[in-house]
Amino acid sequence: MNYNIAVIEGDGIGPEITREAIKVLDAVGKKFGHTFSYTHVLMGGCAIDAHGTALPQSTTDVCLASDSVLLGAIGGPQWDDLPGNQRPETGLLALRRAMGCFANIRPAKLWQPLKIACPLRTDIAEKGIDMLIVRELTGGIYFGDRGRDENGAYDTKRYSEHEVRRIAKIGFDMARLRGKKLHSIDKANVLESCRLWREVVADVAKDYPDVDYQDMLVDNTAMQLVKSPYMFDVILAPNMFGDILSDEAGAVTGSLGMLASASIGETKCGLYEPSHGSAPRMAGLNKANPLATILSAAMMLQYSFGLQAEAQAVEDAVLHCLETGVRTYDIVGDTGVTPVGTREMGDAVAAAVLA
């Protein structure tokens, strides 16, 4: 089977980490008899430099014509002084909307060989952390009316019933496939949009009587993520709350270098990217951790291509590398082992897939 993948390397360490994910995908193809074809396109700061816009129309066209999209990372200090509507990040927001990717799926898992990297008390880490954050991605305050007047600035947070209902269904579907427990996050004691969120989620929950569903205020959620992270299975959250909480969950698990993500929605064509940034100071040093991007590629195999065994093979390969002491600089900790570089980690995972 042949799969066409649009590759957006992006900025900073983006080219380095996507290169290793492609290396692992090619190993999967060799082992399972698939062919992955790649079309490289520009988005982000590099696209601004080359075309004067963060998202050229040609990039959108290629992404929409592909089976899925693999993204490295975008942005960097050289573009920080641009107006807000011209920054590299605007390209990502526009691409998500063009692709109809309204749901961001972000696992936050404490891998057992990396328990030492968890910043929480040992007794908390020992109970295990394995959650999935389902974040609404194309609505809320990031996409609402905004502007400035003579007295200040404003950003509008708005949700329609349709937007809440479709993301809630994805959250409950994910919960049904996992531990059958879902926490829906809001600030319904203050915000009217969150009161709508709570009402619609409760209505959707009626169709999932097998899922243990609870509402939780976002401030309490932020506290419980560091106090009792093991209590969570699936977290369903509006756009901004999900953005913040998923980064917090990433810190709890020890390293952003391990955090994959998928943006999915109306079609099987999804956008897969690591949760971390472009880390421009690490660019070209062969020190970046490619595992988040590699695990994002595994999510692509699972969610967009329906290749469950292949996705599991990548996760098993990552676990094997961690168990045998293969570590990049960010996750080496006090193990006493010599860290490997970006390319070497990619080589190790690819070899483990083929073993």
Image (tube, helix red, strand yellow):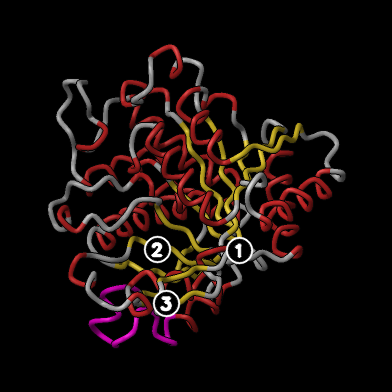
Q: What secondary structure do most residues of the magenta stretch adopt?
A: helix
| Mark 3 / mark 2, whichever is N-terminal | 2
Q: Nearer the viewer, mark 1 or mark 3?
A: 3
Dot 1, crowdedness within 10 Å: few (<14), some or many (≥20)? many
Q: Is residue 253 above or below residue 174?
A: above
Dot 2, crowdedness within 10 Å: few (<14), some or many (≥20)? many
Q: In the rendered structure, find residue 102 and report the number of the disc placed on it.
A: 1
Left or right: 263 in relation to 266: left
> Which stretch did the figure color magenta?
44-59
Q: Residue at x 42, y 81 (%)?
A: 59
Position in image of residue 85 (x %, y %): 38, 78
Considering the numbered disc 2 on the image, is that residue within a helix, a strand or a loop?
A: strand
Q: Are marks 3 and 2 in contact (CB under 8 Å)?
A: no
User: What amino acid type is highlighted by mark number 2?
Assistant: Leu
Report the residue marked by disc 2: 71
Q: Nearer the viewer, mark 3 or mark 2?
A: 3
Cα separation, mark 3 vs mark 2, equals 33 Å
Residue 258 picture quarter = top left
Q: Is residue 54 magenta?
A: yes
Considering the numbered disc 3 on the image, is that residue within a helix, a strand or a loop?
A: strand
User: What amino acid type is highlighted by mark number 1?
Assistant: Phe
Cα separation, mark 1 vs mark 2, equals 17 Å
Q: Nearer the viewer, mark 1 or mark 2?
A: 1
Quarter of the image with the N terminus in it: bottom right
Quarter of the image with the C terminus in it: top left
**Could you say which is closer to the camera, residue 280 or residue 87?**
87
Position in image of residue 203 (x %, y %): 84, 49
Report the residue marked by disc 3: 148
Q: Are marks 1 and 3 in contact (CB under 8 Å)?
A: no
